[in-house]
Amino acid sequence: MSYSASELLAVMAARQLAGVGSVFAGVGIPLLSAALAQKTCAPHLIIVVEGGSIGPEVIPGRLPISTNEMRVAHRAQMLPSITDTFLFAQRGSLDVGFVGGAQIDRYGNLNSSIVGPREHPKVRLPGSGGANDIISLCRQVIVVTLHERRRFVPQVDFVTSPGFLGGGDSRRKAGLLFGSVSRVVTNLGIFGFDAESKAMRLEALHPGVSVGDVTANTGFELLIPERVATTEPPSEGELALLRSLDPDRRFL
């Protein structure tokens, strides 16, 4: 059975939502994964979208490409303002946030602002949007990203969204008393964070991926246990459902 890196990423991210009640998801792979989870491992999952949509129904083949378009409001349970949507997160009402970024470092900090020196950036990126609020306020945050050495850097060029900052208790000392990055899902494996140091740790490899593949595509030293689990490959059913959601392959 063949599948693309994006399809693998979407399926693995969807599985992380098993048993979850609500997810704050951005458009693209995060929304695809959330919609797939509803059809597989989390039938009661409530999807929350930044623009002000709670519990929308994702129509296969008509995926929204913005958090503010009408398709993201289809059959939604609530259409509050964007301010109220983030207030739900601030009140601790949202279980999981799905975010990504152009860079991530060993403590889970994310950069989606600039690449290069702040005074003379090489690349300007979209910025935070709601990502900083999501990573600061949701009970758990799962980072979903392709695994490339240029993304997994020793230190992000700009902290757009705070993970564990400098590790240890530095996040708490910075005043972020709620929420945290709990997991990173890539097309190579699943990653968590050490309870004390908050450094990133390999937890599982995807089928056909070696530890060497992961370290070769990571720009910092990972914590690697003696035994590493292997995830189950995407099933035919999961891939069929995923492809039905995005038949034009806008995101896959």
Image: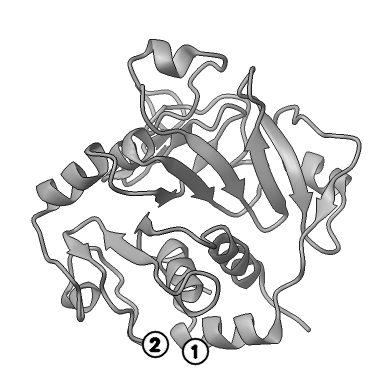
- State the residue lying farthest toward the left: 81
Q: Secondary structure at mark 1?
A: helix
Crowding near the residue tagged with mark 1, few <14, some 14–19, many ≥20 C-alpha atoms within 10 Å: some
Residue 201, x across and y down, in percent: 71, 34
Mark-to-mark CA distance, 1 and 2:
6 Å
Q: Residue furthest right?
A: 226
The x, y position of residue 225, in whole percent, is: 84, 34
Residue at the spot 38% in from the left edge and 88% down from the top edge: 61
Q: Is residue 83 above or below residue 60?
A: above
Question: Closer to the camera, 107 or 157?
Answer: 107
Q: Earlier in the sequence, mark 1 or mark 2?
A: 2
Q: Percent from the top left, x then y, of residue 86?
A: 20, 45
Which of the colour schemes (rainbow, by chain, secondary structure, one colour) is used? one colour
Disc 2: which residue? 60
Name the residue: 26% across, 66% down: 66
Looking at numbered disc 2 in the image, what kind of residue is underneath it? Pro
Instruction: Using the image, determine if residue 87 lies above or below residue 19.
Output: above
Please give left or right for residue 5 compared with residue 32 in the image: right
Q: Mark 1: which amino acid?
A: Ser
Please state which of residues 130 and 235 is positioned toward the viewer in this rendering.
235
Q: In which quadrant will I find the N terminus?
A: bottom right
Residue that appears at 21% across and 80% down: 74
- Determine the secondary structure under disc 2: loop
> Which residue is labeled 1 in the image?
244
The answer to whether the residue labelled 1 contacts the one labelled 2, judged by CB atoms less than 8 Å apart, is: yes
Q: Looking at the picture, tell me which residue is in the foreground, 143 or 46.
A: 46
